[in-house]
């Protein structure tokens, strides 16, 4: 491809001449050649994009920074199909106060010509909904759909009344004057903020007390207490940087969610979520997400925290500084308060993504954290875990449990009785279990559950010994599945994760730790339960086979028929003869043996 090794912007077009992708490069020839080389390392989205490229153009630039600025301008102008595009759908938000006799306060997205009072506009919906929610709770205004005065005195108060969050006009015990006063106070609180509202309420409380209107003074006192309680909950969350944006990305197999938490004066004032296709290159995607976000937002804070490394950090920081007209710092905090805010942002992203893909946010966050900890390309949707159980080398068994989307999938649990040898050898047992499991996959072919579905991650109860026993099995079947051990401490609690290169500490990753610890406990429980059942059956069989004329086959038949040894001991000869494989001589022997005991 005859392209120069200089900085520039490349523009890909489809057969109709439409721009479908814009990118910048430090060396145009090297970057563009990556798209048209081997397709094996690309995601389906990239492969489809390349298939649709009918023509491309490029613009040479004097520097990579100049290429970045031009790239941003072209993406904003063309909105190419295959670039990561963040849609600016915030619009304006208002707080609406109806003009009826019993006014109501609500958050709305559109200003109508209906005679109502509209406070705003605001650019962030989070700000509006939070303000309305706080005002309604502090001043004990209804949050239900009842209409007043139509519904006054017609029903019993709901739960909000009993938890002191509603004055309950529906009960008929609140006068119109008291209700209007509460609405006016709520509007003043929304317009002037908590400090101004507190000053006014203090003044009115003192006036009411001096005028011996103690009931009104008590209402003012309760509102003051409610505002102070709210302020305690809204303490400054970031003492290091008063103005800051925090970015985090949560991923699953096909989708990802970018969440931005925005702080001003140390308090959270807005949050935004963007659902996108799961990116091929996380570092490059974070650069694109930051570029895309500030291309549609005017305010760039002096500090931006993000959950992982960003490609071209120096370039993107220079671009952000040029937008802001001052220095902007882009950091990946590792510890302290800012790292906690990044973690909070990541949890919010996981929750939003979970709502989109239809699974619990806690599990999504735990899988995302586990993937980052283990260096997986994406969160493991389908996890298999294995454990071995025996008593001093007898009655060896293995258990396999399955977790799908972070939750147990009990229909896919499987049990294995060790058949290849006798005696105690956990490593050989683990190798046999995994060999049989993947042989079943080869024999049965692919399906959506059980042995027919390959896992995204394998966890073994044990350390590097179990790990090294299993790796040759995967190699034998030509499988490239990540495998890790779950290491216990002396108290049989999860301590670390064993990898081929050593141990990975897990205690500091709370959600991943909880998930792995739960998986380890579950696979241990399942394996031990099977072992005890098999060991008990083995012991019972031994008791029966000690009777003359009773071998393994007859012993198993007796246990299947009567279920317990006690039932066999209490059976008469006629009942014993009814069991398959039993004759009169064998029935007499069993009957006599238990009577002699």
Image (tube, rainbow, N blue to C red):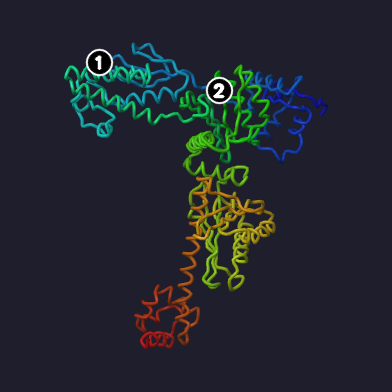
Q: Which residue does the numbered mark 2 point to in the structure image?
A: 301
Q: Quadrant of the N terminus?
A: top right
Question: Would you say the residues marked 1 and 2 are in contact, meaning their CB atoms lie under 8 Å apart?
Answer: no
Q: In this image, 267 relative to 141: left or right? A: right
Percent x, y of residue 481: 64, 51
Q: Residues within 10 Å of mark 1 (few under 14, many from 20)?
A: few
Q: Which residue does the numbered mark 1 point to in the structure image?
A: 101
Percent x, y of residue 442: 64, 57
209 is higher (above) or lower (below) than 37: above
Residue drawn at 68 percent across, 24 percent down: 22
Residue drawn at 59 percent across, 73 percent down: 422
Percent x, y of residue 573: 37, 84
The first of marks 1 and 2 along the sequence is 1
517 is higher (above) or lower (below) than 425: above
Q: Nearer the viewer, residue 445 or 417?
A: 417
408 is higher (above) or lower (below) than 111: below
Residue drawn at 47 percent across, 87 percent down: 548
Quadrant of the image occupied by residue 577? bottom left
Q: Residues within 10 Å of mark 2 (few under 14, many from 20)?
A: many
């Amino acid at each position: 491809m005859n392209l120069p090794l200089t900085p520039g912007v490349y523009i890909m077009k489809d057969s109709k001449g439409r721009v479908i992708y814009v990118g910048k490069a430090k060396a145009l020839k090297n970057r563009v050649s990556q798209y048209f080389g081997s397709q094996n390392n690309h995601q389906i989205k990239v492969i489809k994009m390349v298939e649709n490229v009918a023509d491309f153009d490029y613009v040479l630039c004097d520097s990579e920074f100049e290429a970045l600025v031009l790239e941003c301008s072209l993406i904003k102008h063309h909105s190419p199909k295959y670039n990561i595009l963040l849609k600016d759908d915030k619009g304006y938000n208002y707080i609406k106060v109806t003009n009826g006799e019993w006014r109501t306060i609500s958050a709305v997205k559109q200003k109508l010509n209906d005679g109502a009072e509209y406070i705003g506009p605001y650019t962030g919906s989070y700000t509006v909904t939070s303000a309305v929610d706080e005002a309604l709770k502090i001043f004990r205004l209804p949050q239900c759909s009842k209409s007043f005065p139509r519904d006054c005195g017609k029903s019993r108060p709901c739960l909000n009344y009993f938890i002191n969050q509603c004055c309950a006009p529906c009960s008929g015990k609140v006068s119109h004057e008291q209700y209007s006063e509460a609405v006016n106070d709520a509007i003043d609180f929304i317009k002037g903020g908590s400090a101004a509202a507190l000053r006014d309420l203090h003044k009115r409380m003192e006036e009411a007390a001096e005028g011996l209107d103690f009931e009104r003074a008590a209402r003012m006192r309760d509102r003051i207490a409610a505002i102070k309680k709210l302020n305690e909950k809204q303490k400054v969350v970031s003492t290091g940087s008063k103005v800051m944006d925090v970015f985090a990305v949560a991923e699953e197999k096909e989708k990802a969610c970018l969440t931005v938490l925005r702080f001003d004066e140390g308090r959270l004032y807005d949050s935004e979520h963007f659902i996108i296709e799961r990116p091929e290159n996380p570092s490059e995607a974070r650069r694109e997400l930051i570029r895309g976000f500030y291309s549609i937002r005017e305010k760039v804070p002096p500090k931006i925290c993000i959950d992982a490394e960003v490609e071209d950090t120096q370039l993107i920081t220079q671009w952000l500084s040029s937008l802001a007209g001052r220095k902007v710092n882009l950091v990946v905090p590792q510890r302290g308060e800012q790292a906690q805010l990044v973690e909070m942002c990541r949890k919010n992203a996981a929750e939003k993504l979970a709502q989109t893909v239809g699974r619990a946010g806690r599990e999504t966050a735990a899988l995302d954290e586990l993937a980052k900890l283990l260096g997986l390309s994406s969160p493991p949707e389908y996890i298999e875990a294995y454990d071995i159980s025996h008593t001093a080398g007898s009655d060896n068994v293995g258990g396999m449990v399955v977790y799908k989307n972070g939750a147990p999938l009990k229909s896919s649990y499987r049990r294995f009785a060790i058949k290849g040898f006798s005696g105690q050898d956990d490593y050989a047992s683990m190798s046999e279990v995994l060999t049989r499991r993947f042989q079943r996959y080869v024999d049965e072919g692919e399906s959506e559950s059980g042995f027919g579905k390959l896992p995204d991650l394998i966890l073994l109860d044990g350390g590097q010994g179990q790990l090294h026993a299993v790796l040759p099995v995967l190699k034998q079947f030509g499988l490239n599945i990540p495998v890790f051990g779950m290491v216990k401490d002396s108290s049989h609690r999860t301590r670390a994760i064993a990898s081929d290169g050593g141990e990975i500490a897990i205690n500091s990753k709370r959600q991943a730790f909880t998930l792995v610890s739960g998986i380890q406990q579950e696979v241990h429980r399942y394996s031990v339960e099977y072992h005890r059942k098999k060991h008990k059956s083995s012991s019972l069989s031994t008791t029966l086979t000690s009777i003359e004329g009773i071998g393994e086959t007859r012993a198993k038949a007796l246990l299947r028929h009567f279920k317990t040894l006690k039932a066999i001991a209490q059976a008469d000869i006629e009942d014993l003869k009814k069991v398959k494989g039993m004759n009169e001589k064998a029935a007499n022997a069993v009957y006599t043996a238990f009577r002699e005991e």
